[in-house]
Image: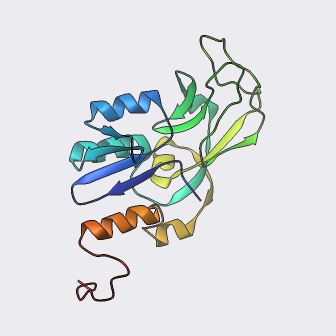
């Protein structure tokens, strides 16, 4: 199971990588986040304010699940559908296809081929649209969503949310250089 965002933590910083969302970006800026164009991540100081923001938007660190998101719980922001900090779908132009991030699926129904107007594109779909998405169990339970599947392996490996590059960068930051067989303090 793969969720649409990654959160990388170091001793003093937190980095968030997630799909584009104008409304999320406004929250990230308001909470002190800085956009890093090189890594394409939002960088925050590791504070209680940042932790509270992450919990509010994505839930507490917990098992990943697939949950059904009721249409009544989807908020429309700009050209997007969202629940909390999770992006469900976006339409960039009224006549373009609906784009969905990792972890979002249509259980039933279809996206409409067009939606809105040239000046105000909108995500639209058939009346029988039903959406499932990968999210943190804590968020799904807090919001009262039906959990349709779980991934027990997601809990057993806390490093599974991090890329190899992020892990290597953290090791180097700590003074550990993988591949250097002469290091004596790897067990520390």
- Examine the rendered structure and indicate whether residue 180 appears above or below residue 166: below
In percent of the image, x 59 and y 42: which residue is there?
101
- Residue 162 position in % (x across, y down): 44, 61
- In this image, 56 relative to 112: left or right? left
For the C terminus, the quadrant is bottom left
Figure quadrant of residue 89: top right
- Examine the rendered structure and indicate whether residue 149 appears above or below residue 74: below
- Residue 98 position in % (x across, y down): 68, 31
In percent of the image, x 29 and y 69: which residue is there?
172
- Examine the rendered structure and indicate whether residue 4 appears above or below residue 119: below
- In this image, 5 relative to 10: left or right? right
For the N terminus, the quadrant is bottom right
Figure quadrant of residue 42: top left
- Residue 166 position in % (x across, y down): 39, 61
In percent of the image, x 53 and y 48: which residue is there?
4
Between residues 62 and 13, which one lies in front from this camera angle?
13
- Residue 108 position in % (x across, y down): 77, 40
């Amino acid at each position: 199971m793969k969720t649409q965002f990654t959160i990388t933590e170091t001793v003093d910083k937190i980095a968030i990588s997630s799909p584009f969302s104008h409304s999320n970006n406004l929250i990230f800026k308001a909470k002190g986040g800085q956009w890093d164009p090189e890594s394409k991540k939002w960088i925050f100081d590791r504070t209680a304010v940042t932790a509270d923001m992450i919990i509010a938007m994505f839930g507490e660190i917990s098992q990943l699940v697939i949950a059904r998101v009721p249409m009544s719980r989807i908020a429309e922001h700009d050209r997007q559908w969202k629940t909390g900090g999770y992006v469900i779908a976006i339409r960039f132009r009224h006549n373009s296809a609906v784009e969905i991030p990792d972890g979002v699926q249509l259980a039933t129904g279809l996206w409409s081929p067009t939606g809105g107007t040239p000046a105000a594109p909108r995500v639209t779909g058939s009346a029988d649209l039903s959406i499932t998405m990968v999210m943190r169990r804590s968020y799904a339970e807090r919001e009262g969503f039906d959990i349709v599947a779980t991934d027990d392996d997601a809990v057993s490996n806390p490093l599974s949310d991090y890329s190899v590059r992020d892990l290597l960068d953290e090791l180097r930051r700590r003074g550990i250089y993988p591949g250097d067989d002469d290091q004596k303090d790897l067990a520390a």
